[in-house]
Image (cartoon, rainbow, N blue to C red):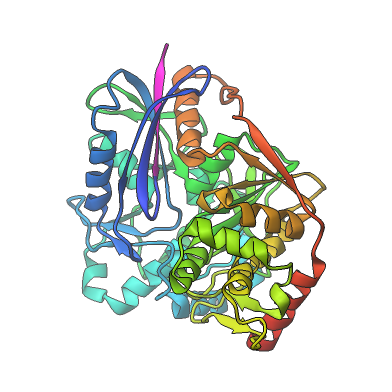
Amino acid sequence: MPLVAGIDSSTQSVKVIVCDADSGAIVREGRAPHPDGTECHPDIWWAAFTAASAGLLDGVAAIGVAGQQHGMVVLDADGHAVRPALLWNDTRSAPDAADLVDQLGGAQAWADAVGSVPVASFTITKLRWLARAEPEAAQRVEQVLLPHDWLTWRLAGRPTRPTTDRGDASGTGYWSPTTGEYRRDLLVRAFGREIDVPRVAAPGEVVGETPGGALLSAGTGDNMAAALGLGLTTADVVVSLGTSGTALTVTETPTNDGSGQVAGFADATGRFLPLVCTLNAARVLAATARMLGVDLERLSALALRAPAGAEGLVLLPYLDGERTPDLPHATGTLHGLTRSNMRPATIARAAVEGMLCGLADAVDAVRTSPGTVMLIGGAAASPAVREVAAALFGGEVVIPQPGEYVARGAARQAAWALSGAAEAPEWELPGVTTVTAALAPVVREAYAALRTLVHS
């Protein structure tokens, strides 16, 4: 049977899975950690990939790479990194984002130009920051890549011109999903001069091969790969609970949301991927568990002992600032404390509800019709998260079998490139669990009231 590999190079780790190209069944897998933080030298990603893939790639016919979106990898004329890559969760470019929005004539002008309103996460704002804050380093920059572009380029033996795909390119702030073209004028506006950018490959295209002869697909961003790995349709919304939280769906037409809430990305198949991203997801639960001196399993059990609404406790969980809404310097707020409700169970419940309330708003923003809400990511394993999500998202959520869906999407894209077919192969989704719960509008109402109180 032909084998394909999918790589997920995420914020916290790299995962590698090897699959049967026809069925998608996983035959072997590995992982290795990435360091914590908001910047990382790309050589560290390569070292982690090398460790994670050791002994796994023998007999693999094609490889696909998915990577964290938006990261800024800047290379000099010799292909060396000028500085550590700035990651999506680095917010130091927030003032630069605001300046760029104003200079082009406002948020709607950006949404019309590139489908999204740039915030500190976006590559274009990081380039503006680099030109302003580190001008000597900026002078050495010859080209800018995204994390998945760099890994694909490295796997291909550093060809003359790297490649990217339309999905990941759509998160830069200087490529338009509507026209399928780079907006080089916006790149120059941000950085002050022309620099090279990768060629945008077509979905399903073979873009090169490894020294060992494995074909390389175009790769994509992590959210686009997750959609591909899940076989997402226009009737579905996916909520992913990892380091960040995302709600996304697939559409046949591009999105141009001038409010900045919905990013109008492209997907990995030729369609479009409206997406809302929050900075604060699973780490909210980890931080709360640490504060309470319990593990995540115990945190879930505590949360389920408290009623919906946490007896009046509301957590605004902006522990690392926030991306949606665009509040990069915000901090968290725990509101409504009394002597009677100041207990571990209610605090645990408030943490789960607070993490999910912003994502309930995100589901409403991207959903175009009634349909399935899928819950994925590490935090989706929590019984409390599942129950609260159903209560906030519409009464029912579907949880696919736990798995590495970003890596699966990258592997499915590799199988597509290997086949040479017009569309990606059909891979059956593993078994799903459905969770239902009574709607809890009071929780969302209290959350919205607190957000207005604190940030109006």
Viewport quadrant of the C terminus: bottom right
- Residue in the image at 32% along x and 73% along y: 131
What segment is highlighted magenta in the picture?
1-8
Q: Considering the whole magenta stretch, tell me its main secondary structure.
A: strand
Residue found at the far left of this picture: 78
Quadrant of residue 300 in the image?
bottom right
Q: Position of residue 202 (x, y in %)?
A: 50, 34
Verify whether residue 6 appears in magenta. Answer: yes
Total marks in image: 0
Q: Nearer the viewer, residue 312 or 316?
A: 312
Quadrant of residue 199 in the image?
top left
Q: Is residue 369 left or right of residue 11?
A: right
For residue 81, above or below residue 406 = below
For residue 40, above or below residue 404 = below
- Residue in the image at 68% along x and 50% along y: 254
Viewport quadrant of the N terminus: top left
- Residue in the image at 57% along x and 82% along y: 333
For residue 203, above or below residue 289 = above
Verify whether residue 202 appears in magenta. Answer: no
Q: Position of residue 208 (x, y in %)?
A: 33, 29
- Residue in the image at 35% along x and 66% along y: 38
Q: Nearer the viewer, residue 255 or 200?
A: 255
Q: Nearer the viewer, residue 393 or 387?
A: 387
Q: Is residue 252 left or right of residue 377?
A: right
Q: Is residue 314 left or right of residue 64?
A: right
For residue 149, above or below residue 244 = above
Q: Position of residue 59 (x, y in %)?
A: 30, 17
Res 166 seen here: yes
Res 173 seen here: no
